[in-house]
């Protein structure tokens, strides 16, 4: 069972919803590579409004649905494991923003929970 508690590193990748890698969403490729690398967890969050280097504001509030809404992928693991993963992000993220933050993980139980409660699993995203 994987456990991660204490000091950790959080990487947040900001990209556009329409960014792709070999004809599939870039956020999907990042999450799958993080999983393959054995990182503790990754989640994708879709923004409702934002702007980046282009200075164009993308929003869901327009009458016609905006294209290319902001997306944030958040990955958390030990500093060593996250830093080992960074070269893959360098390869994948040609336009976007990658932020590293020190953080503290209070509890991560992995695939099974030791709470003693029958049937309870710790299978949630970050």
Image (cartoon, helix red, strand yellow):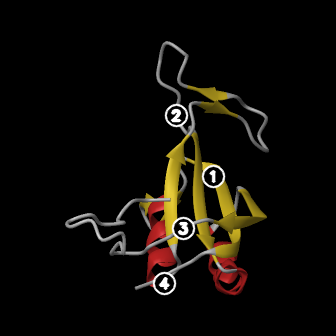
Q: Is residue 90 above or below residue 120?
A: below
Between marks 2 and 1, how big is the CA–CA gap?
Answer: 13 Å
Bin the neighbour count of mark 3 within 10 Å (Cα to Cα): few under 14, some 14-19, many 20 and up: few
| SS assignment at label 2 | loop
Q: Which residue is mark 2?
A: 67
Q: Which residue is mark 3?
A: 107
Q: Nearer the viewer, mark 3 or mark 1?
A: 3
| Extreme residue in the top direction | 63
Which mark's residue is nearer the viewer, 2 or 3?
A: 3
Residue receiving disc 4: 38
Residue hosting label 1: 15
Cα separation, mark 3 vs mark 1, equals 28 Å
Please tell me which of labels 2 and 3 falls first in the chain.
2
Q: Nearer the viewer, residue 55 or 114?
A: 114
- Residue 21, position as x, y percentages in the image: 50, 66
Residue at image point 69% right, 78% down: 86
Q: Residue drawn 73% across and 31% down?
A: 56
- Nearest the viewer among 96 and 99 is 99
């Amino acid at each position: 069972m994987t456990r991660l508690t204490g000091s950790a590193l959080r990487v947040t990748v900001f990209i556009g919803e329409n960014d792709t890698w070999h004809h599939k969403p870039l956020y999907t490729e990042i999450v799958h590579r993080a999983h393959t690398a054995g990182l503790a967890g990754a989640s994708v969050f879709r923004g409702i409004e934002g702007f980046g280097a282009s200075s164009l504001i993308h929003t869901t509030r327009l009458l016609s649905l905006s294209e290319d809404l902001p997306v944030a992928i958040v990955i958390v693991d030990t500093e060593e494991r996250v830093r080992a993963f960074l070269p893959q992000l360098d390869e994948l993220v040609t336009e976007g923003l990658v932020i590293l933050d020190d953080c503290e993980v209070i509890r991560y139980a992995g695939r099974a929970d030791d709470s003693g409660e029958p049937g309870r699993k710790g299978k949630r995203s970050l």
